[in-house]
Amino acid sequence: MTRTNALGEFLRARRELLDPADEGLRVLGVRRTPGLRREEVATLAGISADYYLRLEQGRDRNPSAQVVQALARVLRLDAAATDYLSDLATARRPPPRRRETVPAGIRQLLEVVGLPAFVESRMFDVLAANHLASVLSPAIRIGENRLRSVFLDPAEQALYPDWADASAGMVASFRASLGTDVDDPRIAQLVGELSLASDRFRRLWARHDVRALAGGAMRMDHPVAGRLDLRREKLPVGGTDGQLLVLYHAEPGSPSAEALATLSAGTDAAEVARPAAQT
């Protein structure tokens, strides 16, 4: 995806996911392409078909706020995806990147928090991690990329009994994390690498799903601790270029909390270490 037509690619991907019947449209004959047609989107949004065509083709890249809201309604976008569409429409340039340095206070917090925790960049690179995070998953270590681990490492995938949902959510969150900053060569290289190596990543990336960067419930099948029902929190790190502090925790008094406490009390990360995935 390039900045010159990021808006058009997003609009096309999202309309192709819609069912005409859900929009109250009669479907006559066989359609050659999935989803809504351009003229159907235009009609439902109350704009001309020619204008919508210009938007998809990148010949008009600055629709008004009213048009953005109309398209978001037709495309059934949630709040996060609507904000993303608005950013694409205004061609907002990202701020200059700062050096990827984890603040000293956050590094200290990782060592005393008593929970699996790590810091990831906007590209989901692991910038810092505590011992317990590496015990929870050996792939959570400095220099690893969370997308590469989740999509290319079978051992990492085996940790997630609901890997299909987890991987879909990660790709949608990754797009939200990048925002409109899609012309970074590092991003293009990562997306290209994963698209070639993983059919699932390629299909998910083509959907243009967007999900807000937020915490949520998750499950893991840990080789030592067994089934863990956890919550994942993602907290922004102030004064950085989009770094997030990621923490895993369990409901107090639950079996999962007891298992985490056992791991924290002295499980050596080497006990669950494994060779790196072959790529």
Image (cartoon, grey):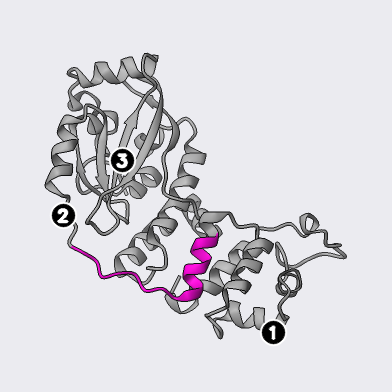
Q: Position of residue 138 (x, y in %)?
A: 25, 34
Magenta stretch holds residue 84: yes
* 233 lies above or below 228: below
Examine the rendering and report whether any part of residue 198 can be seen: no
- Give the CA separation, mark 1 to mark 3: 45 Å
Question: Residue sitting at 47 percent across and 37 percent down?
Answer: 163
The numbered dot on residue 246 is 3
**Earlier residue among tags 1 and 2:** 1
* 1 lies above or below 260: below
The stretch in magenta equals: 82-98
Q: What amino acid is at disc 2?
A: Thr
Q: Is residue 172 left or right of residue 28?
A: left
The image quarter in which residue 16 lies: bottom right
- Give the CA separation, mark 1 to mark 2: 48 Å
Examine the rendering and report whether any part of residue 109 can be seen: yes
Residue closer to the observer: 23 or 92: 92
Residue under label 2: 101
The numbered dot on residue 154 is none
Q: What amino acid is at disc 3?
A: Val
The image quarter in which residue 249 lies: top left
Q: Position of residue 278 (x, y in %)?
A: 30, 45
